[in-house]
RNA sequence: GUGGCCGUAGCUCAGCUUGGUUAGAGCACCUGGUUGUGGUCCAGGAUGUCGCGGGUUCGAAUCCCGUCGGUCACCCCA
């Protein structure tokens, strides 16, 4: 038996897990302040939710899905992203009108793992549903930016684009296709293939992009409604102090996006995977899934990548207030009761799981970064314990009743 | 799916080029020095299928082949 986790997955231990907990706490607090309620859904869905929602032509659907058949013969897929799932849940819930939802959890994509790209990765996100208003786009972009700020990034760029909607995109795509066909000879093999299925993504190809500097941009073809929407998003972002850069080449990898598309780039980070979050508007998604027309905008933040880019190795161990040293085996029950009482009194306290030398118990106290030690010994019979402050190496004898207060005073 | 690099103690790694007696170091861990006192110091101690399989050889951690795993990059994306 080998004990390493499956390829592309990680066991996250302290201290790294402390960084995770911290990031998730920041996220929850932020979501609460912005008025997003938690939605908790399944981690797998009927395969067609993603096949239709995310889009048959996408890389994700074509080769990255963890699809399996359950014992009832249903085709299920481990979710490769959160949005399609949340929209499906909304459609099935009977909820009416605008809703602001937050979610977080693991996502799964079958790919070759590398730095910042895992087969199981963790995303937190929000979806602002049933509103087509540009204010919603701006708010969603803002919450992601604030999240990165609070986690500790100083170098974040918001790349922003609009890829139009059903009204104006066909015209743009026709022009783009014509342009790309002219350039066919200079395109790489992959791009020649994606030219047919999704010409937008050719612009995103790192190999071909240098040859396509004069390619037509989607923003120049926006219809009036999309233009107004995009302008309004920018005005609001400026007003709330979110710096952004217009990126006409920004194309997201999922088919459901309309109008606004954005990405957060960790610019100070030199690894290849510096896109730490992204999102956009998806006004046609609900209909694609067979529901009524429910516009929406959302984002997803990649926790793994954020912590990687932030250089977060995890915070220091949470120090104990007190470590209880048991002088002799016959006092262990007494000590255990003492510890239990202190914990109920709000003291962070622990003791060794088995009787060892006093020296070894002190060593354990030191390792646990305990502020103080209390010795349960002969003094206990007089209702007293010896307490030692490990930082100052001073010790004194106090009454048992004073112990909790003494321990807290060392924080 | 394609390519580069790497698999030796719990961890980080040396040893491999030029095969040769019991495979090493640092850190960490345990015990003792202090029979009720940590962090420092001193002394001692435990720990290895040298990733796995096969081949060459009198002899393989070392050379060859295969395989698995990890890692980084491409594609794509969070």
Image (tube, rainbow, N blue to C red):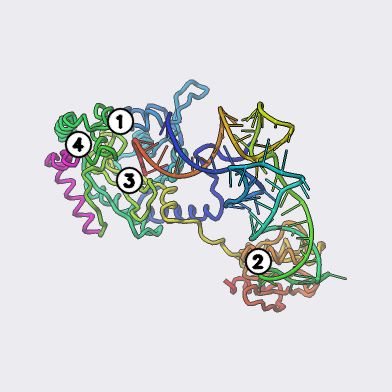
Tag 4 secondary structure = loop
Say few, some or many: other residues with alpha carbon within 10 Å of mark 3 (under 14 / 14 to 19 / 20 or more).
many
Is residue A127 located in the magenta-colored stretch of the structure? no
The residue wearing badge 4 is A165
Nearer the N terminus, badge 3 or badge 4?
A: 4
Q: Residue at x 21, y 29 (%)?
A: A185
The residue wearing badge 3 is A278
User: What distance separates the C-alpha of mark 2 from that of mark 3?
Assistant: 44 Å
| Chain label for disc 4 | A
Instruction: Please identify, in this view, whether the residue under mark 3 or under mark 4 is nearer the observer.
Output: 3
Residue A236 on image: x %, y % = 21, 54
Q: Which residues are magenta?
A: A211-240
Quarter of the image with the C terminus of chain A is bottom right
The mark found on residue A366 in the picture is 2
Labels 2 and 1 positioned on one and the same chain? yes
| Chain label for disc 1 | A
Quarter of the image with the N terminus of chain A is top right
Nearer the N terminus, badge 4 or badge 2?
A: 4
Q: Quadrant of residue A152?
A: bottom left
User: What distance separates the C-alpha of mark 4 from that of mark 1?
Assistant: 26 Å
Instruction: Please identify, in this view, whether the residue under mark 1 or under mark 3 is nearer the observer.
Output: 1
């Amino acid at each position: 038996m080998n004990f390493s986790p499956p390829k592309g997955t990680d066991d996250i231990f302290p201290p790294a897990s402390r960084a995770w907990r911290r990031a998730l706490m920041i996220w929850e607090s932020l979501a609460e302040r912005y008025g997003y309620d938690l939605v908790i859904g399944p981690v797998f869905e009927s395969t067609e939710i993603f096949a239709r929602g995310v889009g048959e032509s996408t890389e994700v659907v074509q080769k990255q899905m963890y699809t399996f058949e359950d014992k009832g013969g249903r085709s299920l897929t481990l979710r490769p992203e959160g949005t399609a799932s949340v929209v499906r849940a909304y459609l099935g819930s009977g909820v009416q009108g605008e809703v602001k939802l937050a979610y977080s959890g693991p996502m799964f994509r079958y790919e070759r793992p590398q730095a910042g790209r895992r087969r199981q990765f963790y995303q937190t996100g929000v979806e602002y549903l049933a509103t087509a208003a540009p204010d919603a786009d701006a708010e969603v972009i803002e919450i992601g930016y604030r999240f990165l700020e609070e986690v500790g990034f100083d170098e974040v760029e918001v790349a922003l684009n609009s890829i139009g909607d059903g009204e104006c995109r066909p015209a743009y795509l026709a022009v783009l296709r014509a342009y790309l066909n002219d350039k066919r000879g200079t395109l790489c093999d992959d791009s020649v293939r994606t030219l047919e299925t999704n010409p937008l993504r050719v612009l995103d190809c790192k190999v071909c992009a240098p040859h396509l500097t004069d390619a037509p941009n989607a923003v120049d073809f926006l219809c009036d409604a999309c233009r107004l929407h995009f302008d309004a998003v920018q005005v609001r972002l400026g007003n709330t102090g979110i710096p952004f850069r217009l990126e006409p080449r920004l194309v997201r990898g999922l088919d459901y996006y309309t109008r606004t598309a954005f990405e957060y780039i960790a610019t100070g980070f030199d690894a290849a995977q510096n896109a730490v979050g992204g999102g956009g508007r998806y006004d046609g998604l609900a209909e694609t899934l067979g529901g009524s027309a429910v516009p929406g905008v959302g984002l997803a933040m990649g926790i793994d990548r954020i912590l990687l880019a932030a250089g977060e190795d995890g915070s220091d161990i949470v120090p104990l207030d007190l470590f209880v040293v048991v002088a002799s085996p016959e006092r262990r029950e007494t000590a255990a009761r003492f510890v239990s009482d202190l914990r109920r009194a709000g003291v962070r306290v622990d003791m060794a799981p088995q009787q060892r030398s006093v020296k070894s118990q002190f060593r354990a106290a030191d390792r646990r970064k305990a502020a103080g030690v209390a010795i349960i010994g002969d003094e206990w019979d007089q209702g007293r314990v010896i307490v030692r402050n490990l930082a100052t190496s001073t010790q004194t004898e106090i009454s048992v009743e004073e112990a909790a207060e003494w321990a807290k005073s060392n924080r």
